[in-house]
Amino acid sequence: MQGKIVKVSGALVVADNMIGAKLYDVCLVSDKELVGEIIEIRKDRASIEVYENTDGLKVGDVVKNTNKPLSIELGPGLIGNVLDGIGRSLKNIYENYGERIKSGVKVQTLNPKTVWKFVAKKKVGDIVFSGDILGVVQEGGIIEHKIMVPVGVSGKISSIKSGEYTVSDTVAKIKTDDGVEKVGLSFSWPIRISRPYKKKIETTTPLVTGQRVIDTFFPLAFGGAAAIPGPFGSGKTVVQHQLAKWSDADVVVYVGCGERGNEMTEVLKEFPTLLDPKTKKSLMEKTILVANTSDMPVAAREASIYTGITIAEYYRDMGYNVIVMADSTSRWAEALREMSGRLEEIPGEEGYPAYLGSRLASFYERAGNVVTLGKDERIGSVSCVGAVSPQGGDLSEPVSQATLRIVKVFWGLSSALAYKRHFPAIDWLVSYSGYAGALKNYYQENLSYEFWDRKNYLMKILQEERELNDVVSLMGFDVLGDKDKTTLDIAQVIREDYLHQNAFDETDTYSSLKKQDKMLKCVCEYAKEAYKALENGAVYEQIINIPSRALIGKMKYVKEDELEKIENLITSIKGDFLELEKKEEK
């Protein structure tokens, strides 16, 4: 079906004579064949959101309806790739069209010329069902890419053979009740439709990030959803980069949604040089980037997060744990607001459309820990972390509020901490994790039974510090008693020696749970010994001047294979306080 343009308003194109068109059908606009998506239909008139530059379009240009939804090609070759908001490979665009992205470029998500070695895991005559693994392809040095029976297909394998294939070749044939289904290395999936699974299950395992303030105080579970709201300059992107680098997810999908191009460039330059802490291979060998930077067509931002989450679900179905970074959902919401305005819809709060909350939920609700399709019942997960950039750091604005109603983990960033050069600038007094209770047993069973109590003990001290700081700001430090002064000193140790983490130091940038457990034990021992010394007659000045006090700040730089040094420090702390007690007895 062909229509004709009757109106052009930025990224919005209105076309007449679109009889039979369906919502979210992909259209090719003008002789340039710009990719667009139908977002509103009124009789035979369709409003089309164009994902490319609309300069030069005019009334009367032809619009072709493909009668297909916006889809992405899924298969080997995604890992290490850089895609635009609608799933086109920027590497393929560069190879075919040069450095500049021209309107109407036609490239596939996957390179059609790349030859992959397919190893069959099934044989002719086997009965298979949706989600069963037919064979594997080694994708890079880390990921074993699993070729699965397509959704909705079941039957007997009539043909399958190991060998070398491209993504467009047929590797197996399945005889079904309706005929023969050809299965290749790749297939297309609509990005707005979540991929099916058997059931969602509760997760009891934390997604270890290597960031102490997160893993210890506000953990994220596999399959969880988290938000990082904060004002400009508070370190949202740095935190997400740290999560992408060091989280123990098997696959990382990083969506640069309306962010600056230099930040994506930094990722592209840095990730190949970094090693995954689990496999010791390049981080790019488990990473997929979706880049829709601030200078790229604004309408494509709206599709970019769905492109990213669809890729994540695909690898989840293979049984992998995937983490999706969306940086930032505020820029995505701005694109949504712009398109809503061009559609002349009644605006909601601050001009955002009334369906802002439901659209955000359609993204975050696709996170989860699931039992996948297939007889072997693999368990995979998708964890979502979205950055929110409220203007002026105002968390009462609509995007922040809508996000907080959906996610269970809130890492609130503080500009005051950032100005003090305290990173990650996650405010421990406003942040929270809804997964803490479900993860308690994991920490107690895999680290130490005291870990949870120690964490709560230190959090209580940090809360007391806030109250004491109010007194100090009004009356001065000298009015405090020795116990309150000691509390402020212990809180300083927690903040500066435990929570503060240097992303640029090769040792401190990542802390394993085992190291965090020992560091937490060290800080707790210092706190308990200090309070005990006060009860035995010691004074504040004596406590802060014990020899081992100065060494606590250096434990964060202890390497992972030298953790006995922290145990030795704990012994030194106890020895110093024992000496202090002996002096008091004399």
Image (cartoon, rainbow, N blue to C red):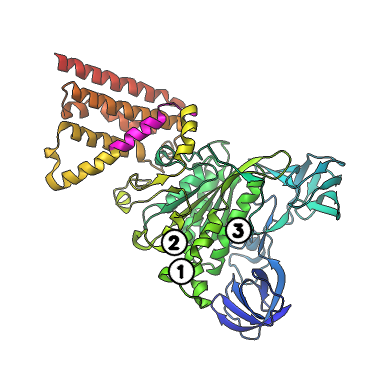
Q: Quadrant of the N terminus?
A: bottom right
| Element type where label 1 sits in the image | loop
Mark number displayed over residue 352? 1
Dot 1: few (<14), some (14–19), or many (≥20) neighbours within 10 Å? many
In this view, the mark in front (1 or 3): 1
| Residue at image point 42% right, 32% down | 516
Residue 74 falls left or right of residue 474: right
Q: Nearer the viewer, residue 46 or 58?
A: 46
| Amino acid residing under circle 3 | Thr
Q: Quadrant of the C terminus?
A: top left
Q: Is residue 111 magenta?
A: no
| Amino acid residing under circle 2 | Val
Circle 2 sits on which residue?
399
How far from the left and from the top, in percent, is residue 573? 29, 23
Residue at mark 2 to residue at mark 1: CA–CA distance: 9 Å
| Element type where label 2 sits in the image | helix
How far from the left and from the top, in percent, is residue 129? 77, 45
User: Which stretch is magenta?
Assistant: 446-461
Q: How many marks?
A: 3
Q: Nearer the viewer, residue 443 or 72?
A: 443
How far from the left and from the top, in percent, is residue 383? 54, 47
Q: Are marks 2 and 1 in contact (CB under 8 Å)?
A: yes
Circle 3 sits on which residue?
307
